[in-house]
Image (cartoon, rainbow, N blue to C red):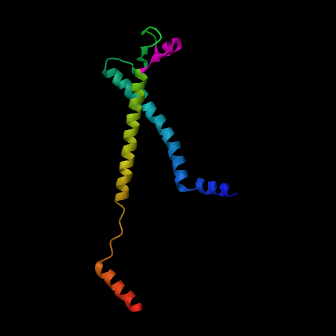
């Protein structure tokens, strides 16, 4: 029973629950960022660069033609899909920047909490005198 009680104490700690909530929210947030990149940012970049579609950029490794879509080329054999990598990299950079900003804001909020004022020196001295007189 000792192991089960230790596990129960571990599982109901605030940090574990906070971590679980963070993972769940992070997964959902990752999907939002993924959609933002694939559905809004990459089409805008594509339009600016003259209609380029990064998601279908690849280098064929199995003698496929470069005129195929990425999905068709993957069916025909191995490909080096660098366009997909660029999209995922942009995803990561946006997500990392947003998380950085959130941590930065939280750190600023923690710093603004009022700190305990140091005890004045004369009060410390008076306490020492009081304690000495009690002895």
Please state which of residues 21 and 35 is positioned toward the viewer in this rendering.
21
Q: Position of residue 80 (x, y in %)?
A: 44, 18
Q: Eyeballing the image, is 121 above or below 44? A: below
Please state which of residues 78 and 75 is positioned toward the viewer in this rendering.
78
Residue 18 visible at all: yes
For the point 51% across and 43% down, the residue is: 23
Q: Eyeballing the image, is 116 above or below 80? A: below
Q: Position of residue 8 (x, y in %)?
A: 63, 55
Please identify the quarter of the rendering in which residue 110 is found: bottom left
Please identify the quarter of the rendering in which residue 126 is found: bottom left
Q: Eyeballing the image, is 39 above or below 124? A: above
Q: Is residue 8 magenta?
A: no
Residue placed farthest to the right in the image? 1
Q: Position of residue 54 (x, y in %)?
A: 39, 20
Q: Eyeballing the image, is 109 above or below 130? A: above
- Residue stretch rendered in magenta on the structure: 69-81
Q: How many marks?
A: 0
**Image quarter of the C terminus:** bottom left
């Amino acid at each position: 029973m000792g192991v089960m009680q230790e596990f129960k104490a571990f599982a109901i700690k605030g940090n574990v629950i906070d971590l679980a909530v963070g993972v769940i929210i992070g997964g959902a947030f990752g999907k939002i960022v993924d959609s933002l990149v694939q559905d809004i940012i990459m089409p805008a970049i594509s339009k600016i660069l003259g209609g380029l579609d990064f998601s279908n950029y690849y280098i064929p490794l199995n003698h496929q033609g470069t005129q195929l879509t990425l999905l068709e080329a993957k069916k025909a054999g191995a490909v080096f899909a660098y366009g997909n990598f660029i999209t995922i990299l942009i995803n990561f950079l946006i997500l990392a920047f947003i998380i950085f900003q959130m941590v930065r804001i939280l750190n600023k909020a923690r710093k603004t909490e009022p700190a305990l004022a140091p005890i004045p020196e004369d009060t410390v001295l008076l306490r020492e005198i009081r304690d000495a007189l009690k002895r």
